[in-house]
Image (cartoon, rainbow, N blue to C red):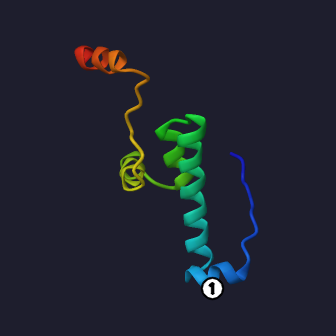
Amino acid sequence: MCQVMINVPNEVLFDTHMDIDGATEFARKMVALGYYTQNNVSIGYCSEIAGMTEEEFMIFLGQNKIDVFKFDSKEELMRDISNA
């Protein structure tokens, strides 16, 4: 597993009322969100990055108005429904 390190100015932590653990949790969630929305990484991997269960990550996606179901067309959705 790869580890990424970022520098967050102390002033940002002060302004956001976050401690290091809160900033770490926030960064993990935002990185996972970016991987999911911009790079089509799976919910499983993104939930691992975020330090959440898959169910928790799916709820997190919903809280951020991100749809879990991705269809390129109405026809693809209809095919998926008929195969269910």
Screen quadrant of the C terminus: top left
At 33% across and 15% down in the image, what residue appears?
A: 75
The extreme front residue here reads 74
Q: Residues within 10 Å of mark 1 (few under 14, many from 20)?
A: few
Residue behind mark 1 = 14
Left or right: residue 12 compared with residue 69: right
Name above or below for residue 58 compared with residue 80.
Answer: below
Camera-nearest residue between 15 and 4: 15
- Residue 79: x and y in percent read 30, 14
Under circle 1, the secondary element is: helix
21 on left or right of 1: left
- Classify 43 as above or below 80: below
Report the front residue among 83 and 55. Answer: 83
Task: State the count of labels.
Answer: 1
* Residue in the foreground of this view, choosing between 63 and 49: 63
Residue at image point 60% right, 83% down = 15
> Which residue is located at x 74 percent, y 63 percent?
6
> What percent of the width, then of the height, locates residue 64?
42, 54
Q: Amino acid at mark 1?
A: Phe
Report x, y in % for residue 7: 76, 69
Instruction: Give x and y (percent) for residue 25.
Output: 55, 65
Q: Residue at x 63, y 85 (%)?
A: 14
The quadrant of the image that shows the N terminus is top right
